[in-house]
Amino acid sequence: MTLTQAEQSPFRIPADSPDWWRQAVVYQIYPRSFADANGDGIGDLAGIISRIDYLKELGVDAVWLSPFYPSELADGGYDVADYRNVDPRIGTLDEFDEMSTKLHEAGIRLIVDIVPNHSSDQHPWFKEALASEKGSPARDRYIFRDGLGEHGEIPPADWKGSFGGAAWTRVPDGQWYLHSFAIEQPDWNWNNPEIHADFLKTLRFWADRGVDGFRIDVANSLAKDLPEVLPSAAELAAMPIDGTHPTIDRDEVQDIYAEWREVFNEYDPPRTAVAEAWLDDPARRARYARPESLGQAFNFDLLTADFDAAQFRRVVSTNLEQQELSGSSSTWVLSNHDVTRHATRYGLAPLNGRKVKQGAEWMLAGAPADQLDRDLGVRRARAATLFVLALPGSAYLYQGEELGLHEVTEIGDHQRQDPAFFHGGRRDYDGLGRDGCRVPIPWTSEGPSFGFGAAGAHLPQPAWFAADSVAAEEADPDSTLSMYRRALAVRADLVTGEGQAAESLEWDDGLSQGDVLAFRRPGGWLCLTNFGAEAVALPAGELLVASEHLSADEDGQQLLPGATTVWLRQG
């Protein structure tokens, strides 16, 4: 699809802008759980098409689609059997083209997921590998090894997969293949030129169909250097992540992305990309965000931060420093398809720096209601969202967060789908898995699936969805949905468009005291967040948007209540 000229464009950020992504608001759609047009209980492309007007009214600049490719759903679609097609349960290539065109006509760009670390075990090349002999070119596309022991009966190493269980699986002729995640997800061998060529073909395939950018799954793990004698799991875990680790964030991975950047730059404007790279060292993560690499990298630091002024300031300052090093813009994320929804996280006891995923322990304990303050969680979530939307950089929203949805815990063991649950891996980190944030979202307050489709939903929806549906919240000017719409409309005027604001902020240390955090953006506007419980005096200024109603003291002085963010125009 060729975009129209900037002066005719429906896009809020001009269509020909190579930097449209730098301060964009991107809305993540998990396709199987967004909207179901044919009533089979699974979301589809036709369902997305039917909701484009909703996305336009919400005010997002782009949508990111989680995998929609043919898949056996061993990992929610991240086990891809065909990288250049659409799962027939989700739609067709013709429907993809229609969706791409209509999104662009609505002024919304399109980003798709690419899963390059591993394929599905149903991919034709893996089937060919299993049918071929040891040492064959077909096997060399993946990572096969002979086993240890007298008869090769012991795996090449005692490594564990991210979802639990062994990371090596034996095939009938006695060899073993590596799968860093589920057994159904064999790792590609990126030392093989065929893999490089095939993924370049995939990138061009989707870019030619109008895709504006790519989200790269497990971007830090493609390149591997496995010695003949593999280290033990304990040895592997003790190795530094400094560019020389055998499997994580090797320096050579940047050679792959330099190839991809050449493809992205073939298009006008260039295609963009964002790396999913869970790395503790921000400087290592910044390498993926360089212009000669993918161009942007997810900053997940707020996913593990408490609702706390000092923690938020530290996260923002650190990532803005890395932004300067990479030349990219930062990204801000509060929820996605892999983590407990932030309305729930903020209603639980703080982590206080402990390295566990917020909500995991609570879910493992049976999600006791007395440990979750649902109202406070939503209030803090709204304040955090308004804080994030004021920051320089791009904001990534996850479907349903604009409704203030909590994590769904009312899922029976027999109803769960996440391999993290079934394989028992990382229970202290993932809890009962990620199904609770992937439940189909509610559009109406009634019906067999709250308007998701004409029948039921592939994951059970709780009764409390009725009050949090789109229909219920559209009728309420104080709802979370109404706040998101107001905030995104105001943000568009302040940040994007022809007069795109500078990607900077200035901390106001006079206002930033104790539980209060304040910063100023170019154009004379102020973001002020009260992370505490007690109301504080509000400075003078024109109120642009607030996450909650303001209060006043007996003298009429306006107050900023606890767990509330406001944007003010001053001067």
Image (cartoon, rainbow, N blue to C red):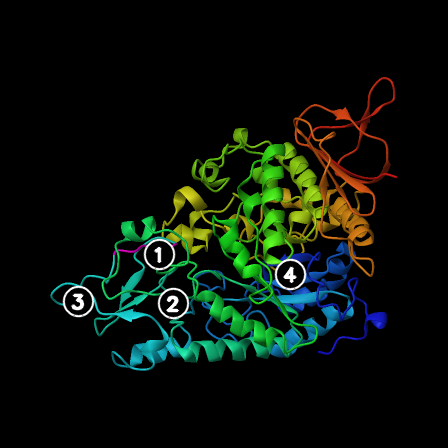
The residue at 53%/42% (across/down) is 304
Residue lying at the far front in this picture: please name it: 325
Q: Decide which of 192, 532 is in the foreground and name it.
A: 192
Real-space CA distance between mark 3 and mark 4, rounded to the nearest whole angstrom: 49 Å
Q: Could you tell me which secondary element the residue under label 2 belongs to?
A: loop
Judge by depth and name the residue closer to the eye, 24 or 44.
24
Q: Which labelled disc corresponds to residue 540?
A: none
Task: Tell me which label, 4 or 1, sits earlier in the chain.
Answer: 4
Residue under label 2: 187
x and y, in percent, of residue 359 in the image: 50, 39
- Name the residue rendered at 69%, 72% in the picture: 100
479 up-or-down from 148: above or below = above
SS of the residue under disc 4: loop
Q: How crowded is mark 2: few (under 14 residues within 10 Å), some or many (20 or more)?
A: many
| Residue 307 placement (x, y as % from top left) | 60, 35
Query: Main structural element of the magenta stretch: helix, strand or loop?
Result: loop
Q: Where is residue 12 in the image (x, y as percent from the top left)?
A: 79, 62
Q: Inspect the image, locate mark 2, and give the three-letter code of the amino acid beneath it.
A: Asp
Look at the image and tell me whether residue 475 can be seen: yes
Disc 1 marks a residue whose amino acid type is Gly
Separation of disc 2 and disc 4 at Cα?
31 Å
Instruction: Give the mark nearer the N terminus: 3 vs 4.
Output: 4
Q: Are marks 3 and 2 in contact (CB under 8 Å)?
A: no
In the rendered image, residue 206 lying in the magenta stretch gets the answer no
Nearer to us of marks 2 and 4 is 2
The amino acid on which the numbered mark 4 sits, given as a three-letter code, is Ala
Residue underneath mark 1: 161
**Which residue is denoted by mark 3 in the rendering?**
152
Write down the region rendered in magenta. Answer: 158-162
As measured in the structure, the alpha-carbon distance from the residue carrying label 1 to the one carrying label 3 is 20 Å
Q: Which of marks 2 and 4 is nearer the N terminus?
A: 4
